Image: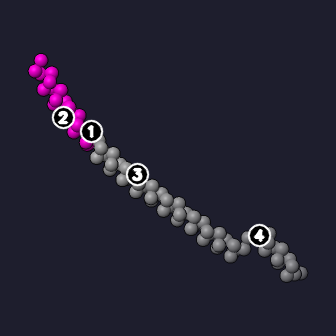
């Protein structure tokens, strides 16, 4: 027959349903943390991309203006 001591040994050796449930909840929480971190990174990347686009537009404007100045300077020679 199986005694209570045997059952205790089996519970120590094998994973119980409660252990799996606790493990599953823990894993779900960790995944949620990772998902939140990725969301923060995407938000940061979007913000940086917008800043880069703004700087690129400013640089294009400056280059266009310098080209006009250059054209005026070298056209009068």
Numbered tag placed on residue 65 in the rendering: 2
N-term-proximal mark, 4 vs 2: 4
Asked which secondary structure carries label 3, the reply is helix
The CA span between labels 3 and 4 is 45 Å
Q: Is residue 35 left or right of residue 45?
A: right
**What's the CA distance linking mark 2 and mark 1?**
10 Å
Disc number lying in front (4 or 2): 2
Apparent side of residue 18 relative to residue 50 in the rendered image (left or right): right
- Measure how far apart labels 2 and 3 are at the Cα level: 30 Å
Q: Residue at x 19, y 30 (%)?
A: 67
In the visual, does 29 lie left or right of 11? Answer: left
Q: Nearer the viewer, mark 3 or mark 1?
A: 1
- The answer for how far apart the CA atoms under marks 4 and 2 are is 75 Å
**Residue 51 x/y as whole percent:** 33, 48
**According to the image, label 4 marks what residue?**
14
**Could you say where residue 54 lies in the image, as x and y percent from the top left?**
28, 46
Quarter residue 2 falls in: bottom right
**Residue 43, picture quadrant:** bottom left
From the viewer's perspective, is 2 left or right of 67?
right
Q: Which residues are magenta?
A: 57-77
Circle 1 SS class: helix
State which tag comes first along the sequence, 2 or 3. 3
Q: Which mark is residue 59?
A: 1
Q: In this orientation, which residue lies closer to the viewer: 26 or 66? A: 66
Of labels 3 and 4, the one closer to you: 3
CB contact under 8 Å: marks 3 and 1: no
Q: Earlier in the sequence, mark 3 or mark 4?
A: 4
The residue under label 3 is 45
């Amino acid at each position: 027959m199986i005694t209570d001591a045997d059952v205790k040994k089996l519970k120590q050796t094998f994973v119980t349903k409660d252990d799996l449930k606790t493990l599953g909840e823990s894993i779900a929480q960790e995944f949620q943390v990772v998902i939140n971190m990725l969301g923060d990174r995407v938000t940061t990347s979007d913000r940086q991309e917008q800043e880069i686009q703004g700087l690129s537009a400013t640089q294009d404007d400056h280059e266009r203006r310098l080209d006009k100045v250059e054209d005026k300077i070298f056209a009068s020679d």
